[in-house]
Image (tube, rainbow, N blue to C red):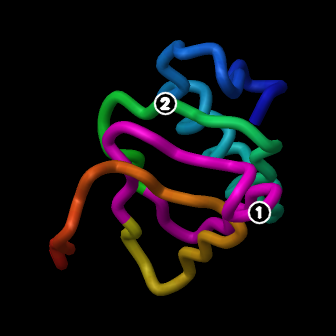
């Protein structure tokens, strides 16, 4: 994710960088690794056909708007999603 401009813990919006990194991971048929730190998301990421992995639930955190899984091939692991949402929306 860092090679696409996502920088943890800087307080800046990482949405566009994460979207670009997710798209690249899908094209390459690989997963997306998020190193330790907090990544801020300004609007929900739409994720389909991708695996996103962090450094562990105590170390990697997505904050802000969260994400929307758009297929049965979405895998999110080893990170915390802290977006203040307590419901789910199935589209």
Which residues lie in the magenta part?
A: 47-68
Q: Quadrant of residue 54?
A: bottom right
- Residue at position x 52%, y 13% in the image: 12
Instruction: Judge the density around disc 2: few (<14), some (14-19), many (≥20) Cα neighbours within 10 Å.
Output: many
Q: Nearer the viewer, mark 1 or mark 2?
A: 1
- Relative to 45, is 90 on the left or the right? left
| Residue identifier under label 2 | 40
- Residue at position x 80%, y 52% in the image: 33
Q: Residue furthest bottom?
A: 72
Name the quarter where the N terminus is drawn.
top right
Give how far across and how far down residue 8 sits, in percent. Answer: 69, 27
First in sequence, mark 1 or 2: give its number: 2
Whether residue 65 appears in magenta in the rendering, the answer is yes
- Residue at position x 82%, y 56% in the image: 55
- Residue at position x 80%, y 28% in the image: 2
- Relative to 28, is 63 on the left or the right? left
Instruction: Judge the density around disc 1: few (<14), some (14-19), many (≥20) Cα neighbours within 10 Å.
Output: some
Name the quarter where the C terminus is drawn.
bottom left
- Residue 70, compared with residue 40, is above or below; it is below
- Relative to 23, is 15 on the left or the right? left
Mark 1 residue element? loop
Mark 2 residue element? strand
Give how far across and how far down residue 77 sits, in percent. Answer: 67, 72
Question: Which of the labelled discs sits on residue 5, or is there none?
Answer: none
Residue 60 versus residue 71: which sits nearer the camera?
A: 60
| Residue identifier under label 1 | 56
Q: CA distance from mark 1 to mark 2?
A: 17 Å
Q: Are marks 1 and 2 in contact (CB under 8 Å)?
A: no
Count of numbered circles on the image: 2
Whether residue 59 appears in magenta in the rendering, the answer is yes
- Residue 72, compared with residue 48, is above or below; it is below
């Amino acid at each position: 994710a860092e090679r696409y401009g996502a920088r943890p813990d800087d307080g800046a919006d990482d949405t566009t960088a994460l979207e670009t990194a997710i798209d690249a991971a899908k094209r390459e048929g690989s997963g997306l690794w998020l190193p330790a730190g907090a990544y801020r998301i300004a609007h929900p990421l739409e994720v389909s056909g991708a695996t996103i992995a962090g450094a562990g639930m105590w170390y990697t955190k997505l904050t802000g708007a969260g994400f929307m899984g758009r297929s049965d091939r979405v895998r999110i692991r080893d990170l915390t999603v802290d977006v203040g949402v307590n419901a789910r929306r199935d589209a």
